[in-house]
Amino acid sequence: MGGNGESESQTRIYLLAQNRLVREVLVRLFRKQADLVMVGVSSDSAAALEELKVIPCDVLLLDSIEPLQAMGERGEVADKLSEVKIVLFGADEDPEHFLRAVRLGVVGYLPAEASSAQMVGAVRNVMQGEAICSPKLCKLLYEMVCKQLLSRPETEERAGHMVGDLTCRQRQLMALVAKGLSNKEIAASLHLSESTVKNHIRRVMRHLGASSRHQAVDVIRTGGVSLNG
């Protein structure tokens, strides 16, 4: 399903949900919003993987985190989704499920009882740089950050060792990632092919145990390496 006639000011949404009734209801809901446009709808993860490689998308709206694992294993899709806001709906308050979703890049975590207004609001809010979850789960994140800060010296030492293993080329490339350059722009700047850039980034992510290129940048900075030069 393509988004015909969408303007640059509209937020482009791709919906991946297994329940047909849910898909139909959400499509009708978002069609009523002048600033939002549905550019793709699917019930099948494999089909969604193929479409997301070519369909411009701002927000990925889905009812399960399982497809995200498969998407992360497909380099070209993972690169495409690095700038996409991911909103999970119909979720429960299980801490492990929530933290797994966060690690996979989810920035909006809506419970099963979320209203249509909350659904629309979540899409708009994540596009403004906000994260959405319940107060209970927000408290969980605070507690985790607190624990990480308390163990920061050990974390920095471990990150420092991992970052020290990166090649000069990889550090140079990640400095451009930190500046927000796309793979195409990085390739042009370093006189490399775009596929080579993608492979470098994936190797760095694997080496640092990062789930995204941006998390890899954070790990490098935690290791005491400046990427501002």
Image (tube, rainbow, N blue to C red):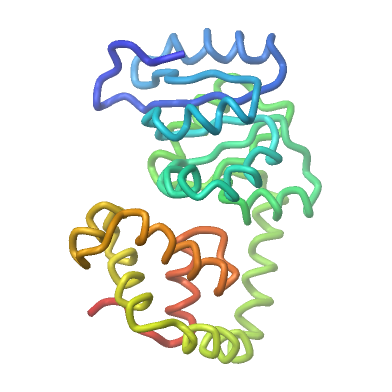
Q: Find residue 132 and report its image quarter.
A: top right
Q: Is residue 129 above or below residue 181?
A: above
Q: Nearer the viewer, residue 37 or 116?
A: 37
Q: Is residue 41 above or below residue 46?
A: above
In the rendered view of the protein, which quadrant contains the C terminus?
bottom left
Residue at 39% x, 21% y is 36
Q: Find residue 91 and report its image quarter.
A: top right
User: In the shown orientation, is residue 185 left or right of residue 210?
Assistant: left
Q: Nearer the viewer, residue 63 or 34?
A: 63
Coordinates of residue 121 in the picture (x, y in percent): 49, 29
Residue at 49% x, 62% y is 202
Residue at 30% x, 76% y is 172
Q: Is residue 193 above or below residue 42?
A: below
Q: Nearer the viewer, residue 78 or 74?
A: 74
Residue at 50% x, 58% y is 212
Coordinates of residue 39 in the picture (x, y in percent): 42, 20
